[in-house]
Amino acid sequence: MQIKDRLRRLKNCPPFIFSEITDVTVYYPGYTNKAVTFSYDDGLKLDAQLVSLFNEYGIKATFNLMGNSIPTNTSDLAGYVAMYEGHEVANHSMTHPDMSKANVTLEAATNDIVRGRDAISAAFGNKFNTSKWGFVWPYSKPGRGDIAQLEQNIKDAGAVYIRPVSTTNSFDLPTDWFLWEPTCKDAYLKDGSNYDYMTPLTNAFIADNTEGLRLLYIWGHAADLATKKYGAGYSELEAVLTKLTGGGVNIWSATNMEIYDYVNAANAIQISADGTRVENNSDIDVYASLNGQNVIIPAHGYSAL
């Protein structure tokens, strides 16, 4: 058949008719509404054991590095950078100052954060995006009169999310990425007794049947796990990882930045004006159900029934 004949036949065909989309349910990759993310602070060499454990279970995590914890020796630096392969590195400042103290000026606090960013960039190269990175407060979010300006300085330097140490014990997504509170610490010291919040909250998360996107967000320090400072050690963490990756459990594992990117992409999808297509203007494929049918809405594309 000649090309002209093909075009003539297509021209005479009736137009494609798409079904009206009346129900859109957004999922994480794998068509699940549950995701888990981990965030560990300081970037010490003790992270090696933690990274190894996460890798064994196929779990992704975010490691928040202090600039002055990064090796200066070239051979040590190569191994340090390789250690975090497959995970996210984020900024935890240069020297971990207590920014709630009056003698830490706005300029000094900002400078320490920017120096931390630049030290990570120098070590990790294009594996760390200086115009889009995460930040974790040293100690915790400081109570200071100029906190709004300090947060603005951090945003202006490229941060797209900020994590404090305060926790929610909930599985809700954040309403403010610059106050992204985790679900829980891997272990927590309260009233002189060791309470392991991580295990019961993991059990509750797996059993949770709430609709909508849910997130289990656990944070901690590799050094605390190594010493069982707050009651939980590597055996307790491994038991949690076993639960999260066990048979019959469908939970998406992602870094903090991957959660940030995906949720923003999912929130940005739109139904076309005629109600027959769901459009995705983000850079990320979005998993969804349209009228009960699972689809992937491609980046900068659309899905229809």
Image: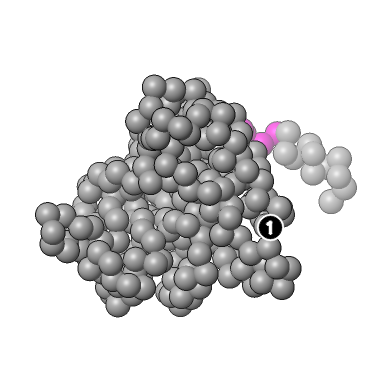
Residue 181 rendering spot, x and y as whole percentages:
34, 43
113 within the magenta span: no
Q: Going by the image, does 209 lie left or right of 303?
A: left
Structural crowding at the residue carrying mark 1, measured as other residues with C-alpha within 10 Å and reported as few (<14), some (14–19) or many (≥20): some
The answer to whether 285 is drawn above or below residue 239 in the figure is: above
Of 42 and 19, the residue lying toward us: 42
Q: Position of 79 compared to 207: left or right?
A: right
Residue in the picture at 63% in, 52% down:
120
Figure disc tally: 1
Give, as a single range, the part of the protein colored magenta.
12-16
**Residue lying at 56% horizontally and 48% vertically, measured from the top left:** 94
Relative image position of residue 201 (x, y in whole percent): 21, 58
Q: Nearer the viewer, residue 98 or 151?
A: 98
- Whether 235 is drawn above or below 167: the answer is below
Q: Is residue 147 above or below residue 93?
A: above
Image point (30%, 77%), residue name: 235
- Is the image coloured rainbow, by chain, by secondary structure, or in one colour? one colour
- Counting from the top left corner in percent of width and height, residue 97 is at 47, 44
Spot occupied by residue 215 in the image (x, y as percentages of width and height): 33, 50
Tell me the residue that label 1 is attached to: 123
Amino acid type at circle 1 is Ala
Please say whether residue 14 is one of the residues in the magenta stretch. yes
Q: Quadrant of residue 8?
A: top right
